[in-house]
Structures are given as structure tokens and as C-alpha cells.
């Protein structure tokens, strides 16, 4: 029986589509402080990438018309958001803003914690939160 999830992986992993995976990985690393796990080429000059944020993983691939995959900007739609807990949302916000992230909502205190909302270079929504307490 295989180990579920595989060692070092989360059981639920968002898979996001980007126009240019290497560029997106550079942006996510510089802007949100994600750590690069791996990147490798796939067919037709596309890429698969994986990044880590604390104990969480995201995977990504190059959007491709033949598979019906689009970035949120290409689709002109918001279909999901990724929620991430952080120790200090204000420090993270300052970094993201300085690096050019599209800020949808600056840090604000909510019942579930201090949170802000940003969009990445291809229009994916990210919600960063420090829990109360």
C-alpha cells in the first residue's frame, strides 16, 4: 500500500495554471517568499513546477488551449482562491506590495484573524492571514 500522502507532500495540493511557469515561480519566490521545490519541462515548451510555503505545497503547469486550461486573467474569471496562514501578515504584506503584487485588500482585522488579499501576475487570488491570539 502506498504512503498517503507521499512523504513531504500535503494531501490536498492546489494545481494552478500560468502562462509562463518559470516566470511565475520567480515572481512567487520574490513576492510571496515561496520556496522552489522543482521545475521540469513537459511537452511543447511547457513546464511543471512545485513550490512550498511553510508546510503547504502548490503545483503549477503551463496553461494550454488544447487542454482547456486558462489563467484567471485569460478566462476573465475568478474561480478559486488560495488561503495561507502566516505568523506575521503585515510583514508579508509589505514585502508583497513592495514587489508589485496587485493588492485587492490591505491588511484588515476580521473574526478569523488579520488578513489581506492579493493577486499574482496571472490573476490568481491569494489570501494571507495571521490567526487571532
Image: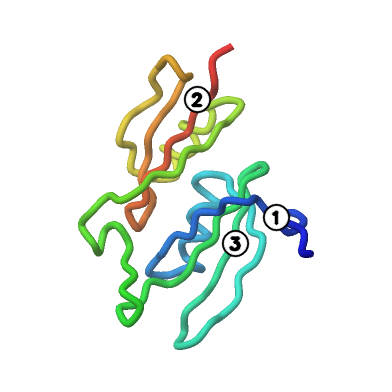
> Which residue does the image show at 63% across and 58% down from the upper left?
36
- In the displayed structure, does residue 126 sit left or right of residue 34? left
Residue at image mark 2:
90
Report the front residue among 17 and 79: 79
Q: Position of residue 113 (x, y in %)?
A: 48, 19
- In the displayed structure, does residue 16 sit left or right of residue 4? left
- Sort mark 3 into few (<14), some (14-19) or many (20+) by Cα contacts within 10 Å: many
Query: Alpha-carbon distance for marks 1 and 2?
Result: 32 Å
SS of the residue at dot 3? Answer: strand
- In the displayed structure, does residue 26 sit left or right of residue 117? right
Report the front residue among 70 and 10: 10
SS of the residue at dot 2? Answer: helix
Give whichever of discs 3 and 1 has the lower sequence position.
Answer: 1
Residue at image mark 3:
50
Q: Which mark is residue 32?
A: none
Q: Position of residue 14 (x, y in %)?
A: 50, 54
SS of the residue at dot 1? Answer: loop
Question: Looking at the image, is 83 positioned above or below residue 79?
Answer: above
Q: Quadrant of residue 59?
A: bottom right
> Which residue does the image show at 46% across and 19% down from the upper left?
112
Q: Which mark is residue 5?
A: 1
Task: From the image, state whether disc 1 or disc 2 is nearer to you.
Answer: 1
Query: Alpha-carbon distance for marks 3 and 1?
Result: 16 Å
Amino acid at each position: 500500500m502506498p504512503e498517503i500522502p507521499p512523504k513531504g507532500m500535503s494531501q490536498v495540493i492546489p494545481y494552478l495554471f500560468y502562462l509562463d511557469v518559470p516566470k511565475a515561480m520567480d515572481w512567487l519566490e520574490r513576492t510571496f517568499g515561496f520556496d522552489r521545490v522543482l521545475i521540469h519541462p513537459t511537452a511543447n515548451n511547457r513546464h511543471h513546477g512545485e513550490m512550498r510555503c511553510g508546510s503547504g505545497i502548490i503545483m503549477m503547469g503551463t496553461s494550454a488551449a488544447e487542454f482547456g486550461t486558462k489563467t484567471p486573467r485569460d478566462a476573465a474569471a475568478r474561480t478559486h482562491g488560495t488561503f495561507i496562514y502566516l505568523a506575521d501578515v503585515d510583514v508579508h504584506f509589505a514585502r508583497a506590495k513592495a514587489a508589485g503584487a496587485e493588492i485587492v485588500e490591505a491588511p484588515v482585522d476580521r473574526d478569523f484573524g488579520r488578513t489581506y488579499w492579493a493577486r499574482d501576475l496571472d490573476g490568481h487570488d491569494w489570501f494571507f492571514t495571521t490567526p487571532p491570539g
